[in-house]
Amino acid sequence: MSDNTYAISVEGLSKNYGARRSVSALTFNVPYGSICGFVGPNGSGKTTTIRMLLSLISTTSGEGRVLGSAISEPMKYLDRVGAMIEGPAFYPSMSGVENLRIFAQMGGLRGTDPNSLLAQVGLAERGTSKYKTYSLGMKQRLGIAAALIPDPELLILDEPTNGLDPNGIHEIRDLIMALAQSGRTIFISSHLLSELEVICDYFVMLKAGELMYAGFKEGLLGGNNCDLIAKPEFGVDLANLANIAALRGLDTSIRDGFLHIERAGELAAEFNRWACDEEIYLQSLTTSSPSLETKFFEMSANQ
Amino acid sequence: MSSRTICKSGFDATRGELLKFRRLSFLLSVFGSLGVLTLLIVGFAWSRAEKHSSSMNLTTGFDMALFFLGILTLCICASYTAQEYTYGTLRNVLVRTPSRQAFLIGKLSALSALTLLLTLYTFLLSTAISLFMSGRHGINLTPSLEGKALLTTLAHCLNGFLGTMALGIFGIALGLIARSPIIAISLGLLWSLIIESALGGALPRIGRWLPTANFESLAQSGATGFSYIHCLSLSAFYLLVISLPALYLFKQRDVSQ
């Protein structure tokens, strides 16, 4: 495990609750500066893993490093980590400013300016309102503001869009992308795969406590290895076009007047040339990557 | 973790905890209700006293008000500890103050400071009422405020704080065990007001040996047949018995749930 390349690095990390194994021998790395999507169905061990990374629970076996320090020594890294775990949690009868001031004081960060944190998450105007009067979106924003108190190198957000309406989701997405621009590593768990697909450049996928995938987005969603979708100028040429691809060993299918050629994204120019040689001219030629959701279900089914 | 780091974290946690008390609504409700209760109890005690009675002294009213102060402290301590679980704020705190020891130091120190303030407030208020009422009953209390008697009076106030804080620690332990303010307060009141009274009534011999009664004796600088040192050591024993499982559970439990 390298200390300098990865913000999070775990090897063989496991957690048992009695006889039940919640997380099973996880091994993955999260590079510095990435926005990492932590994906998995309910009960897959995401929150348990986050709890172990934050030293809120002990590990059963395995080891992990966060910002270069072992998770068995949380004092060495927790002051550089900001976290919102299992949703925002604050004192309801206190204002946003008061809540942030308390948490900053508790962490020994007396110089923290709660108002600037609230401005950063777009809550400046409601800073003096009591927490219990906040909407769900505002509560999530305050949760992120609290996570930003130590000006963290690593931000861990567990379900930051949970329960939000589409507008709220959009706002949180913009906020996370803005935070990522400052060079922070962001580790974000969510069920909203379409949102993560937009935000993240790195993914760690779990199923039933086991690792399904850990790596860059391109590696997961295909990159150049995506499908090719072609439509000839004349519908009658569709079968001939399929033959051209099939003769070259490519898997094809015809759907709704389009020829789908699997994993042929990088052959687009060549395929166009082969079609022209046979005097078939293309009306459209596009590539199609599987969505994160499609890929997730595909990988889940294969496991 | 070094003891110096724990002390620094504990100091930071204490300051953070104290910020929670700096709310007008909280201060008004706590000091207001305690003030009214003290006024009623001490006023009632003096109104029933006979003229030139020797049974009334400067701290009689304070001793009576201490019972309610103890119950109030138990409720505040249990509630302020358990609500960290119900609000989920404990996990927020612990990802900033990694040491659970520091968190507990902060909680205990801040609640002790609040209890000290409440005890002093009750003491001053009950003393003022007593001085005011004593004149009407032809009782001179000023000797209690002079020389050696003043030291005894102040020592009585300090013991009042110790006995009240013992109930506060009992409340903190219940809060850590129950993890719900309502359950923690209910358990505390059930034990202190009902179970102990019932046991004391059924078995008068053990009555003064029971925890809450013993804390009360400590607050009153000892009781008939029980020396001050006896009350102090028995209180320490009871607090140890309740604190050990509470600390064990606090250390072992997953605080993020």
Image: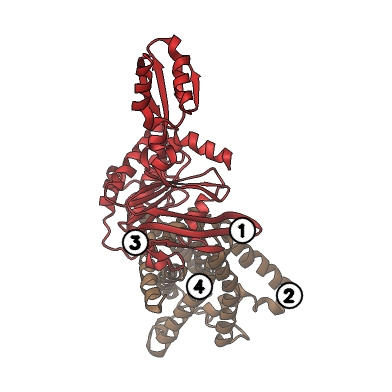
Q: Which mark is residue A17?
A: 1
- In this rendered view, identify the residue nearer to me: A167 or B158: A167
* Disc 2 target residue: B203
Compared with residue A95, is residue A168 higher up or lower down, i.e. above or below?
above
Q: Residue at x 45, y 78 (%)?
A: B157
The residues tagged by marks 1 and 2 sit, at their Cα atoms, a distance apart of: 45 Å
* Disc 3 target residue: A4
Tint applied to chain A in the drawing: red
Tint applied to chain B in the drawing: brown
Three-letter amino acid code at the position of disc 2: Leu
The chain under label 1 reads: A
Compared with residue A70, is residue B156 higher up or lower down, i.e. above or below?
below
Compared with residue B83, is residue B107 higher up or lower down, i.e. above or below?
below
- In this rendered view, identify the residue nearer to me: B84 or A80: A80
Three-letter amino acid code at the position of disc 4: Thr
Disc 4 and disc 1 on one polypeptide chain: no
